[in-house]
Every structure is written in structure tokens, then in C-alpha cells.
Image (cartoon, rainbow, N blue to C red):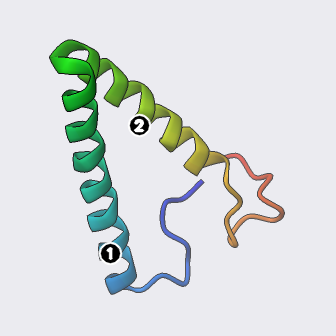
Amino acid sequence: MSYFSRNDDAVQRGGKVAADIACALLLCAFSLVFFGLFGGVIAFVLLESALIGVDYLMPNPDDSGGAAIR
């Protein structure tokens, strides 16, 4: 699934990237604080992989019914 849809302009694409980076840094900080250095890194990797998986499975307007695999 493409990260950007066809009707996204440059500002919207930049906002998506900035929001993803900000969320990743915030999740990394929380996981390090709650689980320590080693556990925080593992928790961050697991959480980010789950979030990327959910983002991959969500339907996109460019896909017909969200069933396309790219």
C-alpha cells in the first residue's frame, strides 16, 4: 500500500512525515522511561512494527476496497 495517496499535496505529505517522526520519538521516550534501556528498545520495535502493520492493512482510497496487495 502506498504511504501517500494520489490526491495528497506537498504540505499534506510533509505533515504526515513530521507527525510520524514526532509520534515515533514520543513512543520511544515513553518506552525507554517505562521499560528501561533494553526493554524500551524491544518495546519500541514491537510497537512500531505493529503500527506499521496496521497502517499497511487500513484501506486507502486508491485501492479498490482495500484489497490490493502491492
Q: Residue furthest front?
A: 34
**Vertical comparison of 20 with 10: above or below:** above
- Residue 2 visible here: yes
- Residue appearing at x 26%, y 66% in the figure: 18
Left or right, 8 with reference to 20 = right
**Residue 45, horizontal then vertical, whole percent:** 35, 27
13 w.r.t. 40: above or below: below
Q: Is residue 23 above or below residue 30?
A: below
Instruction: Judge from the rendering whether residue 39 lies leftward or rightward of residue 56; answer left or right.
Output: left
**10 relative to 65, above or below:** below
Answer yes or no: is residue 70 visible: no
Name the residue at the top extreme: 38
Mark 2 falls on what kind of element? helix
* Residue 23 placement: quadrant: bottom left
User: Which residue is at 48% across, 81% downward?
Assistant: 8
**x, y percentage for residue 28?**
24, 38
Q: Which residue is mark 1?
A: 15
Q: Is residue 19 left or right of residue 58?
A: left
Q: Secondary structure at mark 1?
A: helix
Residue 19 position, x and y percent, is 32, 65
Residue 38: image x %, image y %? Answer: 21, 13
Taking the image as shown, residue 42 lies to the left or right of residue 2, namely left
**Residue at 83% of width from left, 62% of height from top?**
65
**Which amino acid type corresponds to the residue marked 2 in the rendered image?**
Glu
Residue 61: which quarter of the image?
bottom right
> Can you identify the residue that label 2 sits on?
48
The residue that appears at 29% across and 74% down in the rendered structure is 14
| Camera-nearest residue between 56 and 46 | 46
How far apart are the two marked residues, 2 and 1, measured between alpha carbons?
Answer: 19 Å
Q: Earlier in the sequence, mark 2 or mark 1?
A: 1
